Image (cartoon, rainbow, N blue to C red):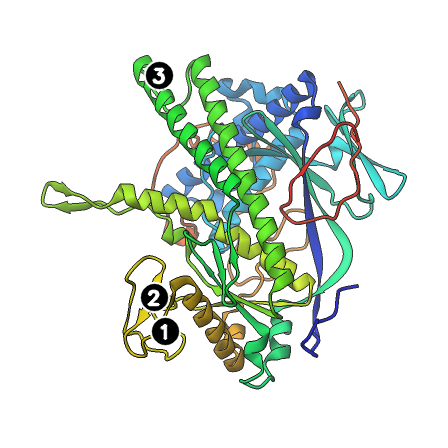
């Protein structure tokens, strides 16, 4: 049962079922045979996905967006990717279906058009029910057994015991890889209902202007201070975490320089690694990126938990356009001359913003706050750092990065704390005016194959069944070459040996990572 409000005597009228996720590191638990098999599955799925993405781009460039489909048989027949025939067809089918779903999401404006993913990025393969079995064990645990194929003569490839009941687990799992690290993840329904965020905001809108500010905590995100609360609390990395991030980043720079030098001396004809030494360096770089990602994710979970535990009943943050803020500096020219554009400084700022991971932190704060019957609100970030929270004047100056001085009333304060107080004030204004309801976006859902299609005013991209007849109509691999092309307006898409493992029961947390303990 969801906890009641601590102070505010109001209750949400709507509730939602929560879909939680789990992620387990299995790198230390895989034998050589298991790791090789999973690496082949993941690599094959990524190759097929990249081929479909290139095919979609070519079709759109030719004005044939309605021919986008999930067929993958022509790709398997290419001699350059003959190894795909050794991979279970379910893995390839799921990869093609995932690429098609990404293209559909881009057409509907839910996400950007899918991009080709390199072999040193984090890649994954989707495993559906044909390739695994669920066996309940004691104490609401489940043993997940993965097989090497879906045939009658299949053999057990890998098994793992997860601390969740079989009834709560989803019908598919994901095996991911980055460098030499493997991850087993999935989703589950914990059977609990949680209040809807908009309903929580509606329930406090009736409070007086004098009482409402006492329930609101404003948070300002930044680089010097990742999170600054309006009550003066600062949430930051520990000195050890900062040292590790700095050390990993410096080593990545050295390895990338060494890799570039090897490619240049070797005369590589492409950006791919063409020797064992190059692949070894690329794996080292991918491993370091994984370590930095786990440090950021651990920080995001720790900070989000602390924020929710110490904040008021409403948490306000800025609605930042993080993708736009972290774009590379634009090129400046004067005639034929290229001018300085501060690209190096902008790259450093982008790196610092990405290290903070504000987007991930805000996502975790929202779901953890709703689970505690606390509301989450995003406000317009314009002039929050320039406006004085005491008098509202914008006649201010910043003598230093951390300093703030109001020339109208003489207030001197920390710039981040002043911004956090402005965020809290704007939260009061948006709640009283009902502006949060206008900003709420309707939930968009992609129609999946095999399920009843949702009603939509937009025509679906021409989906053809992936049967043999439709696959024969494909014109070979002419559409698989990569090309950077403009999108067609009519399409609506814009591109921009088996082991057993037992785990202790832990609380499911979205996007959390649990280190597997082989000793159980």
Precedes in sequence: disc 3 or disc 1:
3
Asked if the residue under mark 1 is in contact with the one under mark 3, i.e. CB atoms within 8 Å, the reply is no
Local SS, label 1: loop
Name, please, the residue furthest toward the left: 335
Mark 1 lies on residue? 388
Q: Is residue 516 above or below residue 208?
A: above
Mark 3 lies on residue? 262
Residue nearer the viewer, 314 or 134: 314
Q: Residues within 10 Å of mark 3 (few under 14, many from 20)?
A: some
**From mark 3 to mark 1, how far is it between C-alphas?**
54 Å
Q: Is residue 509 left or right of residue 236?
A: right
Asked if the residue under mark 2 is in contact with the one under mark 1, i.e. CB atoms within 8 Å, the reply is yes
Q: Quadrant of the N terminus?
A: bottom right
- Number of the label disc, if any, that sits on residue 291: none
Q: How many marks?
A: 3
Precedes in sequence: disc 2 or disc 3:
3
**From mark 2 to mark 3, how far is it between C-alphas?**
49 Å
Mark 2 lies on residue? 404
Q: Is residue 10 above or below residue 167?
A: below
Q: Is residue 369 left or right of residue 327?
A: right
Precedes in sequence: disc 1 or disc 2:
1
Q: Position of residue 353 (x, y in %)?
A: 42, 48
Residue nearer the viewer, 460 or 267: 267
Q: Is residue 112 left or right of residue 257?
A: right
Which residue shows up at 62% across the image and 29% down it?
182
């Amino acid at each position: 049962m969801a906890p009641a409000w601590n102070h505010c005597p109001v209750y949400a009228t709507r509730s939602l079922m929560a879909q939680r996720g789990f992620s387990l590191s299995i790198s230390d638990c895989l034998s050589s045979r298991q790791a090789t098999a999973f690496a082949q599955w993941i690599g094959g799925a990524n190759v097929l996905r990249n081929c479909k993405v290139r095919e979609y781009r070519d079709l759109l460039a030719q004005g044939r967006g309605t021919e986008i489909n999930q067929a993958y048989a022509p790709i398997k027949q290419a001699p350059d990717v003959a190894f795909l025939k050794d991979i279970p067809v379910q893995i390839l089918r799921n990869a093609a279906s995932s690429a098609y779903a990404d293209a559909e999401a881009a057409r509907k404006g839910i996400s950007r058009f899918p991009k080709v993913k390199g072999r040193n990025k984090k890649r994954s393969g989707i495993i559906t029910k044909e390739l695994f079995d669920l066996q309940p064990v004691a104490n609401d645990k489940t043993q997940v057994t993965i097989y090497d194929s879906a045939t009658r003569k299949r053999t057990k490839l890998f098994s793992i015991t997860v601390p969740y009941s079989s009834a709560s687990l989803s019908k598919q799992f994901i095996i991911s890889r980055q460098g030499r690290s493997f991850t087993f993840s999935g989703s589950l329904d914990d059977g609990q209902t949680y209040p809807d965020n908009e309903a929580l905001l509606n329930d406090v809108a009736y409070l007086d202007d004098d009482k409402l500010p006492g329930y609101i905590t404003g948070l300002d995100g930044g680089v010097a201070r990742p999170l600054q609360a309006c009550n003066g609390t600062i949430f930051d990395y520990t000195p050890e975490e900062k040292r590790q991030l700095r050390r990993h980043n410096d080593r990545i720079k050295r390895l990338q320089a060494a890799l570039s030098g090897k490619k240049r001396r070797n005369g590589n004809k492409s950006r791919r690694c063409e020797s064992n030494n190059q692949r070894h360096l690329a794996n080292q770089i991918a491993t370091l990126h994984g370590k930095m990602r786990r440090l950021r994710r651990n920080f995001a979970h720790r900070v989000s938990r602390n924020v929710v535990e110490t904040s008021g009943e409403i948490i306000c943050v800025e609605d930042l356009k993080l993708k736009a803020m972290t774009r590379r500096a634009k090129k400046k020219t004067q005639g034929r001359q290229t001018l300085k554009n501060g690209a190096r400084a902008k790259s450093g700022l982008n790196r610092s913003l990405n290290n903070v991971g504000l987007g991930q932190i805000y996502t975790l704060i929202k779901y953890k706050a709703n689970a505690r019957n606390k509301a989450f609100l995003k406000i317009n970030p314009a002039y929050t750092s320039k406006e004085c929270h005491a008098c509202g004047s914008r006649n201010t100056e910043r003598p230093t990065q951390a300093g703030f001085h109001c020339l109208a009333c003489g207030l001197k304060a920390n710039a981040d704390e002043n911004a956090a107080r402005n965020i809290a004030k704007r939260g009061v204004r948006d709640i009283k005016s009902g502006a949060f309801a206008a900003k709420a976006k309707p939930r968009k859902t992609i129609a999946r194959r095999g399920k009843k299609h949702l009603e939509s005013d937009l025509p679906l991209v021409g989906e053809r069944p992936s049967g043999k007849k439709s696959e024969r109509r494909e014109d070979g691999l002419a559409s698989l070459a990569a090309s950077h092309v403009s999108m067609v307006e009519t399409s609506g898409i814009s591109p921009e040996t088996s082991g057993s493992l037992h785990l202790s029961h832990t609380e499911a947390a979205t996007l959390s990572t649990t280190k597997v303990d082989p000793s159980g």
